[in-house]
Amino acid sequence: MNASGEPGRPITGTPVRGFFERPLFEDPSRRALERVGVIDVGSNSVRMVVFDGAARSPAYFFNEKVLCGLGRGMAQTGQLNPEGRVRALAAIRRFSILARSMNLTSLTMVATAAVREAADGDSFRAEIEAACGIEMLVIDGEEEARLSAQGVLLGWPGAHGLVCDIGGSSMELAEIGDNSVGGRVTSPLGPFRLQQIAGGKAGMKAHIGGVLQDLRHSLPGDYRMLYLVGGSWRALARLDMARRNYPLTVMHEYEMTPKSIRKTIDWLKDRSLKELRDRTGTSPDRLALVPLATQVLRPLLHVFRPKEIYVSSYGIREGLLFEQMPDSLRARDPLIEACRHIEAANARLPGFGRKLFEFLMPLYRNAPPERMRLIKAACLLHDVNWRAHPDYRSESCFDTATRANLGGMDHRGRVFLGLALMNRYKTNGVDGRMAPLMKLLSEEEIRQAVMLGRAMRFGAMFSVGGPQAAGELRFFPKKKVLELVLRPSMKDLFGEVAQSRFAALAKTLGLETRVRVGRAQNGKAEGADD
């Protein structure tokens, strides 16, 4: 339970400063981040994303992609794929009309390797700008690497290591740490480029090995963490999930090891394209590039020797949003800011989450920072599914945590949060659909999640005005006593249901209960000295 105290001295619920700063999405100066649009013209796909970016962890208001294949065949012809040009123009025409109808606060269109390197790249840019009335920014490889790395930082404020972004025609690497981007390089290791390498398997291996050694000389650091960005890496991760029968299919922050990746690469050799498509739902065009991408990834793991590998759903588009964020917003925790935003939009009593958190603080005074984040998030989300049917409310809570677009939280954190929220509404275990996900948690983590759920279950119903308006929890760790001190004017709130839930909480913690009526002081109950 991560709590301690001196003999006879209770741990009380004094609010911890800094946990619940005023949410920046309420600040009028931040409303400029609403409806931020990005059109990303890549070598393989053209995509428009519109962010509802007022919170630190943005929601995707609109997200559409067309696999145009602009860079297909370019290594041989030197020009953009003719069919790809037609499809890209049609897609961008559509996106420009949609953008105007959405009244976006900003819209940025960027083009990467294919357009910047093709002989007809300038004419294509001029054609797009004339037809759609939107400026196309053609960025170089280092800028592409920087923006992709910023996208990773949007989802992982504490990320530290190396970002690898693979597109159709290029692959970029960038160092990240201390919430900023360091050294960065670009390379011609995109799958479309590799299709034209001569010399068969030996020639391909020699070419990739030589390029990677040059990249290693440019980035000589020790990178324990590797963050993978790009459609080919996401497709590979989806295949890794299929091979492992992994129970959670959320792509962002999916963790792999070098050993797991090597097993998946070998596993792919014996699988047909149809089988892989049926198991993962990945498009044939995307799957076709995975074998070439894996020929880069296997030696990359050998050259840079990362120990932990994560998949990022955030990349260049999110990096452009990060670019527009003020430093004060960049510094915020994306998970907590997103939960604040969800609470404000969906809870019956917005602001109650903070009161609930402070009421429960005696139980978590010495919890480590990562656990404290999840406790805060749970309190903020404890009631956002209240409109769901009572028979399915607990399941809805679980799905909110495990499937929602929440940044800054790994898969174990998602399941922990989901289990806690589920136990906020029911106490009879998990159903068959959820059971496989429990394998991601240790027995102690499951116990902690159930404990948090039962604590919220008691605190949330104790008083509509906020649990601290009715009483105060006091925790005596050495004596194994959980005390509830009631304000005299509020003692009748401690009825049968409240008593039952308080007893259930104490039983989960292995504590004895003590209830007393104290005198009110500064709006809180004060118990007699122990």
Image (tube, rainbow, N blue to C red):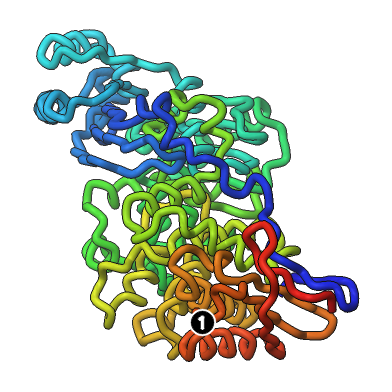
283 sits left or right of 263 in the view: left
Evaluate whether residue 262 shows in this view. Answer: no
At label 1, which amino acid type do we have?
Answer: Asp
Q: Quadrant of residue 389?
A: bottom left
Between residue 515 and residue 253, name the one nearer to us: 515
- The vertical placement of 389 against 272, above or below, is below
Q: Position of residue 151 (x, y in %)?
A: 46, 35
The quadrant of the rendering that contains the C terminus is bottom right
Residue at the (62%, 68%) spot, across then down: 360
Residue at the (38%, 50%) spot, across then down: 344
Residue at the (68%, 83%) spot, across then down: 516
Q: Position of residue 149 (x, y in %)?
A: 51, 33
Mark 1 crowd level (few <14, some 14–19, many ≥20, 10 Å Cα): few
Between residue 311 and residue 500, name the one nearer to us: 500
* Residue designated by label 1: 492
- The vertical placement of 185 against 452, above or below, is above
